[in-house]
Image (tube, grey):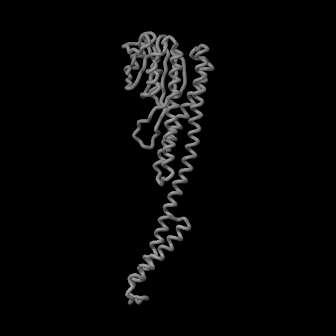
Amino acid sequence: MIQYFINKDGKTIEINDAENGAWVNIAPPLKQAEFEQLSEELDIPLDFLTDSLDIDEKSRFELEDDVKLIVIKTPTENNSINESDAYYITIPIVIILTHNQILTVNSFDNAAIKKFLNTFHNRHPEKRNMMVLKIFEKVVMNFLDYLKEINQRRNQLEQKLYDSNRNEELLYLMRIQKSLVYFVTALRSNELVLMKLARTNFLGLNDDEKEFLNDLIVDTSQALEMANVYTNILSSTMDAFASIISNNLNLVMKRLTSITIVLTFPVLVSSIYGMNVDIPYQHSPHAFYIPVILSIVISVIMSWYFMKKKWF
């Protein structure tokens, strides 16, 4: 699906073709025929448009036939039905600068482009470099938002793990850990690209735009540091709670063993008095109460002993 937007009188207007100064957004569903048509219409290398189809595409930039390509990674929710997959993954956003238009290509719906669309009426199409930087800004904000969600999920799972004897919560933490691995890899790649853009001045930025790019590099570094910190905390948490779950299981087994021992003595007394041989007090009128009372007394003594040892 190809969308064309222009900013007119502070309003975002969707149009039917690629006018000068238009923002062209290519979003799912993606069709090869549309790529080929747009490539011929705007004189863009076809592989620039199809790079977004590879989910493992690395962050980078290049120039070909006076057309600039920038690939940057952004996070998104993982819609996989596999319960062992990460909650969040990273996908490439392709930004293409032609002589007259700016294009974005997305293989998946993502929050960064939606946020940019919501603020497009504030943009100045003639300042294309600033538009690119604003897309970078939305990507960084997207990472920070998802990192906060990940930290909240981790805290909630930690509370459940204190009394847990199951592996289910640890599997959830593993899914969070996978998400953080994606984030760390993407943020490190994005940071290198932004630093290289600042060093080479690939976009031809003015002083204000260079300052804004430097701020984005700092924000990306902070997001990367957050992701690394959360990853380290999560690794330590998983190791600690794996031991806690093992200890909880040992405690349960100890309690069950203690209960089994306590119940063994009444069974033993009953078995002895159930033998078909002569036994003490078998002719006593209290022959029924003797084994019952004896069983209760032994059970109470054993229970008191185990409670003193804190096995219960």
Residue occupying the far front of the picture: 285
Q: Relative to 203, does residue 164 appear above or below in the rendering? A: below
Residue 77: % across, % down: 44, 34
Residue occupying the far right of the picture: 199
Q: Relative to 244, does residue 62 appear above or below in the rendering? A: above
Q: Quick check: can you spot residue 65?
A: no
Q: Relative to 118, does residue 184 appear above or below in the rendering? A: below
Q: Relative to 57, does residue 252 appear above or below in the rendering? A: below
Q: As rendered, which of 25 and 66 lies closer to the eye?
A: 25
Instruction: Name the quadrant containing residue 30.
Output: top left
Question: How many numbered dots are placed on residues in this image?
Answer: 0
Residue 232: % across, % down: 58, 41
Q: Quick check: can you spot residue 141?
A: yes
Q: Is residue 224 left or right of residue 113?
A: right
Q: As rendered, which of 165 and 285 lies closer to the eye?
A: 285
Quadrant in which the N terminus is drawn? top left
Q: Residue at x 49, y 64 (%)?
A: 255
Q: Residue at x 57, y 31 (%)?
A: 223
Q: As rendered, which of 264 and 199 lies closer to the eye?
A: 264
Residue 247: % across, % down: 53, 57
Residue 23: % across, % down: 44, 16
